[in-house]
Amino acid sequence: MKQFRTIFHFELGNYFKSKVFIGITLVAMLAIAGLLSYPRIAEALRTEDDAETKSSRMLLVAAEDEREMLLSAFQAGFENCDVSLCEEGIDAAREQLLRAEADSVLEFESLQSVTYYVDNLSMTDMTPQTAYEILRQLNQVQAMLRGGMTPEQVDEAMNTEISFRTEALGKDQGMSFLYTYLMIMLLYMTIMLYGVMVCNSVASEKSSRAMELLVTSAKPTAMMFGKVLAAGFSGLVQIVLFFGTAILFYNINRGYLDESGVLTALFDIPGSMLAYMLVFYILGFLFYAFLYGAVGSMATRLEDTGTSSMPLQFLMMFSMFVNIYGTTSGKVDGALMRVCSYLPFSSSMAMIARIGMSSVPVWEIALSLAILLLCTLGTGIVGAKIYRVGVLLYGTPPKPSAIIKALRHG
């Protein structure tokens, strides 16, 4: 235990003293604080001229008997736009558009035919869709009037109030998708970053032959667990700092951010869900970190770690793609996601997605957690034995027979 504590504190100190670690952490925290404070800063810097923002101007060109009807309908449909008639005709309207005196022009040949003129067509311009919906309703009204209905009856038919209520007895996938997807992405990125760091750390110590001295004075299990847990703890500290900064500045700027339902859903994580996320996150990270440590000990050179760790990266990518498919398609309880929620290399992501976006029985969560815990401990012990064999072999990677022998007699 003393050896483990010594190695753990040594490795952890290396992470916390690293300028790269400190720099990335501070930059990320400042970026999070800046993004969540941007609405407050923008409000403070807004001038009176900015407050009086000029609304866009839309011109309508139509037959005389349809002008007032179209003007009333489009003024109601485009509340944030200055809609007016151009009685001089389409040529005059296009001239105003070219002189930037108007932002758009709609020419109505009839209620069934319209041409939209605009100088620069934006990718987010929703005017055609809105105009189409307005004209569709106008044509419905005209058809009802021609059918003998009075204007009062038409108004009653077009403005019938409908009470629509949604009550989710299980999970609301739309609300939980954001924080579920965020946690899966964090797990994936943390494994990729710190797993590779563990792998490279072991490989570099092996290539510098410093491991020969270390392995004779400390047990391989203590060395492996010390390195992996130090990397995991430093990663957890970073994530706590990131989330803490986000929560702090979200609450400070809540009055400027409450209009965003996305942020509200993101920060409204149930306590039980947060606990499950933390447990599966830690175990999932440790499982892969032990594998990365074993891979690093088998690499003959530091340059070989990329090739050696490629199978692990494929496993992670497969798990990630399965979860992306399950969460975006809504099939979080599909057969593929159910199977992946029990496999140790994918359960940390799949079960987080299922818990967040579905109603999972407690026994399934317990079973998945037990399998992942046992496999993580087993991977750590087996990885330590592979580590002992690998670190003392230089020039050529350890043969499978040597690894199997070490596992049997270690």
Image (tube, rainbow, N blue to C red):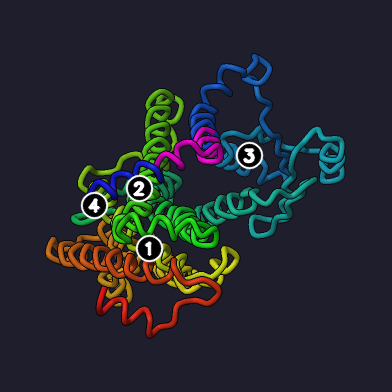
Label located before the other in sequence (1 or 4): 4
Distance of mark 4 from mark 3, alpha carbons? 56 Å
Percent across and percent down for residue 257 are 44, 30
* Residue bearing the label numbered 3: 71
* Viewer-side residue, 43 vs 113: 43
- The nearer-to-camera label among 4 and 2 is 2
- The nearer-to-camera label among 1 and 4 is 1
Label located before the other in sequence (3 or 2): 2
Helix or strand or loop: what does disc 2 sit on?
Answer: helix
Helix or strand or loop: what does disc 1 sit on?
Answer: helix
- The nearer-to-camera label among 2 and 1 is 2
Helix or strand or loop: what does disc 3 sit on?
Answer: helix
Percent across and percent down for residue 295 are 44, 68
Residue 276, label in figure: 4
Query: Is residue 240 shown above or below 197?
Result: above
- The nearer-to-camera label among 3 and 1 is 1
Q: Which residues are magenta?
A: 12-26
Label located before the other in sequence (4 or 2): 2
Label located before the other in sequence (4 or 3): 3
Q: Amino acid at mark 1?
A: Tyr
Q: Amino acid at mark 2?
A: Ile
Identify the residue at image location x=55%, y=42%. Answer: 77
Identify the residue at image location x=31%, y=40%. Answer: 268
Q: Amino acid at mark 4?
A: Tyr
Q: Is residue 144 visible?
A: no
